[in-house]
Image (spheres, rainbow, N blue to C red):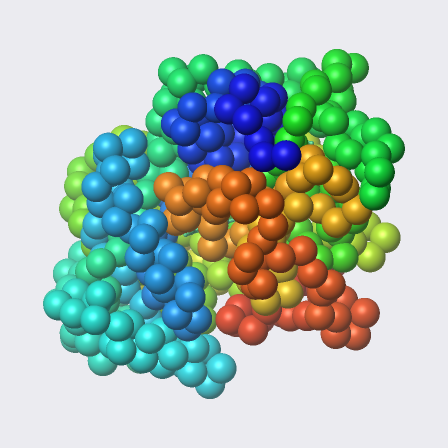
Amino acid sequence: MPLAKSDPVLIVGAGTFGLSTAHKLASLGHTDITVLEKDNRVPSRFSGGFDLNKIIRSEYIDPFYTDVALKAIRHWQTNPLYQPHFRQVGFLNVVTGEAPAVVQNALHKYNQSVAANPAFNGYLVPCPDADAIHKVAPQFTGALPGWTGYLNRLAGYAQSSNAMQAVYGACVQLGVKFALGEAGEVDELLYETAPGGMKCVGALTKDGKGHQARTTIVAAGGFVANVVPAIASQISAVCWGVSHIQLTPSESEKLRGFPVTTVRDIGFFFEPDPATHKLKVCYMGGGYTNQKNGLSVPYSTLAESEYVPEEDVRQTRRLLKQVLPHIADRPLVDTHLCWVADTSNSDFIIDFVPGTTDNSLAVLSGDSGHGFKMMPIVGDFAVDLLAKGAQELPRWRWREPEVEEGRPKHIAWRATVTVDLSSTPRAKL
Ligand SMILES: Cc1cc2nc3c(=O)[nH]c(=O)nc-3n(C[C@H](O)[C@H](O)[C@H](O)COP(=O)(O)OP(=O)(O)OC[C@H]3O[C@@H](n4cnc5c(N)ncnc54)[C@H](O)[C@@H]3O)c2cc1C
């Protein structure tokens, strides 16, 4: 039976995907939506989207995602809910002179994919060397040794927490209910035996309360396997370190306006945030896992994620020395680990859970570290699934993972392999 507008819907997770879905359903007239969130505030500090900013770019080596991301960018440019939080400063995609061949090759493929797509006509600026990069980013005072790549002006960044705050506010206005903290953290899903399998009938939260629902949508990011254990073989929670440099207002003003820059063999950084004057920078290795019994799950408390590994500090300083040497040795502040849900091939998983009946349980997961830009349209994907009753796109179906040496297959577009946090020294800052 299709979902009626008055049927109770539960969404587990008020992160990027959960908020987008709640907003879409409420906008379509669904009247009984409850979002359960383990943090005691929204935007949730556990969400991969919770920080100053996220890159909004549409180049993908895979043209399928380029098309999807282009749709999302149109929303960031024009949708009144999202547009105030988008800064179209461009996306500088480069490698250093020390980049390994595999990373140079990835840059080449990105370059080819945008050059071949008419949507980017007039937006691309080749940047074959440091001189060309200094022209498009005069704020960069470093030597940019061997840097080469291109600038795509049909891109930029979103002030991500601000965008989440706005969508949360819009949800509340539309009557979406939120339960937070102990009252929102799902301990387990509730099932009833039904002909042909188990029917999910809602969720039990940490405060002992049962929440009944006709359909439950789990959008718990890297934590998804805690709620839907059967997905654990397809998803690995992976994190990256996030660091900031606190600038003065005048230093921040001088640097304002440079494009979001990804140096594919080291990391990425953003123009200073206009409100806090913090410059965010992330080392972009293969990411880190927290392995427990062969599965990777995020740390369960915020405090455990409030550090970055030593390697991040080393690479962050290496990057800044090349581009903004005057701030390269400044203290790194607000360091933390940011968790996502990786699949073996970076495809999302947007599907009903096999073995559950009556379209009672869906997952919206597998963001693989590239989901924030999709926030304006992820809710459409969930609504589509509910309306059609099955995932028509094979790539977003629940599937068996590709396994390599007993672990989920390494994701090819990342520069280095994933390392477990237990074997990585913590930075002492
Ligand atoms: C360092 C870093 C940089 C990134 N940069 C970019 C970028 O530049 N561009 C881009 O597009 N994407 C980027 N991403 C990825 C982006 O943040 C994620 O793809 C996106 O946040 C995924 O959304 P989600 O809703 O699946 O998960 P999340 O946003 O993580 O939300 C999951 C939510 O579920 C809640 N939850 C978990 N368990 C429970 C439970 N048991 N009960 C109730 N609630 C629960 C959590 O508290 C959280 O709020 C980046 C991620 C990281 C880590």
Q: Is residue 264 visible?
A: no
Identify whether 184 is placed above or below 158.
above
Identify whether 76 is placed above or below 167.
below
Tell me where residue 402 sits by quadrant: bottom right
Q: Is residue 316 visible?
A: yes
**Residue 163 appears left or right of 250:** right
Q: Could you tell me which residue is drawn at 83 percent across and 42 percent down? A: 197
Q: Could you tell me which residue is drawn at 74 percent across and 74 percent down? A: 404
Q: Where does the N terminus fall, quadrant-wise?
A: top right
Identify whether 166 is placed above or below 273.
above
- Provide residue 99's location: percent of width, then percent of height: 43, 79
Q: Residue furthest bottom?
A: 101
- Provide residue 147's location: percent of width, then percent of height: 30, 75
Q: Which residue is at the front of the view, 25 or 243?
A: 25
Q: Which residue is at the front of the view, 213 or 289?
A: 213
Q: Could you tell me which residue is drawn at 60 percent across and 45 percent down? A: 389
Q: Which residue is at the front of the view, 104 or 21?
A: 21
Tell me where residue 103 sits by quadrant: bottom left
- Provide residue 53's location: percent of width, then percent of height: 37, 43
Q: Residue furthest front?
A: 1
Number of callouts: 0
**Residue 290 appears left or right of 98:** right
- Provide residue 23's location: percent of width, then percent of height: 43, 29
**Residue 183 appears left or right of 175:** right
Q: Could you tell me which residue is drawn at 13 percent across and 68 percent down? A: 122
Q: Where does the C terminus fall, quadrant-wise?
A: top right
Tell me where residue 400 sits by quadrant: bottom right
Q: Which residue is at the front of the view, 429 or 391?
A: 391
